[in-house]
Amino acid sequence: MPDSVLPRAAAAAAELVVVEASDLSVVAGSPRIVVRFAAEDAGQALSVGGHVVEQTGLIAEPLSWTVTARDQGRWYLVR
C-alpha cells in the first residue's frame, strides 16, 4: 500500500538510529521519500540507508537512493 511506504522507511531507520524527520513528496512526477536521521559517521549512515532501502523494498520498488550529510548548512553526498 502506498500509504505504508513512508512509515515503513522511517521505522526501518528508527531500528538503528534516531529519526529526526521523514517526508514524502513528488518531484518531476516521481515519489521521493526523505528520512532524516542522526548517525555517528559516514559508515553508519550508509548502513542505515541500505537498511531503509532493503526494508522499503519489501513493499515498494526503490529505483535509486542516496545518503547525504549536512555540513554548515550544505548537503553533501556520503560515499
Image: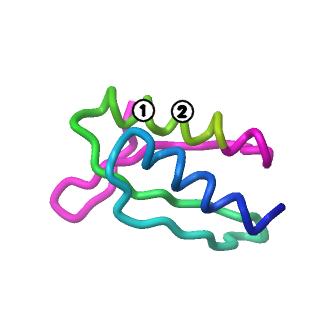
User: Main SS of the magenta segment?
Assistant: loop
Name the residue: 61% across, 69% down: 24
Picture coordinates of residue 53 (x, y %)? Answer: 62, 39
Q: Badges 2 and 1: C-beta atoms under 8 Å apart? A: yes
Reply above or below: 14 against 24: above
Reply above or below: 19 against 78: below
Relative to 37, is 62 on the left or the right?
A: right
Relative to 15, is 44 on the left or the right?
A: left
Choose top left, top right, bottom left or bottom right for residue 29.
bottom right
Relative to 3, is 53 on the left or the right?
A: left
Residue 72 part of the magenta-drawn span = yes
Q: State the quadrant of the N terminus.
A: bottom right
Reply above or below: 78 against 25: above
Amino acid type indicated by mark 1: Leu
Name the residue: 34% across, 44% down: 17
Q: CA distance from mark 2 to mark 1?
A: 6 Å
- Within 10 Å of disc 1 (Cα), the crowding (few <14, some 14-19, many 20+) is some
Under circle 2, the secondary element is helix
Residue 31 part of the magenta-drawn span = no
Looking at the rendered structure, which numbered label has been put on residue 50? 2
Amino acid type indicated by mark 2: Gly
Circle 1 sits on which residue? 46
Name the residue: 16% across, 60% down: 72
Which segment is the magenta one? 56-79
Looking at the rendered structure, which numbered label has been put on residue 25? none
Under circle 1, the secondary element is helix
Picture coordinates of residue 62 (x, y %)? Answer: 72, 44
Give the camera-side residue of 41 and 72.
41
Relative to 20, is 71 on the left or the right?
A: left
Picture coordinates of residue 10 (x, y %)? Answer: 52, 55
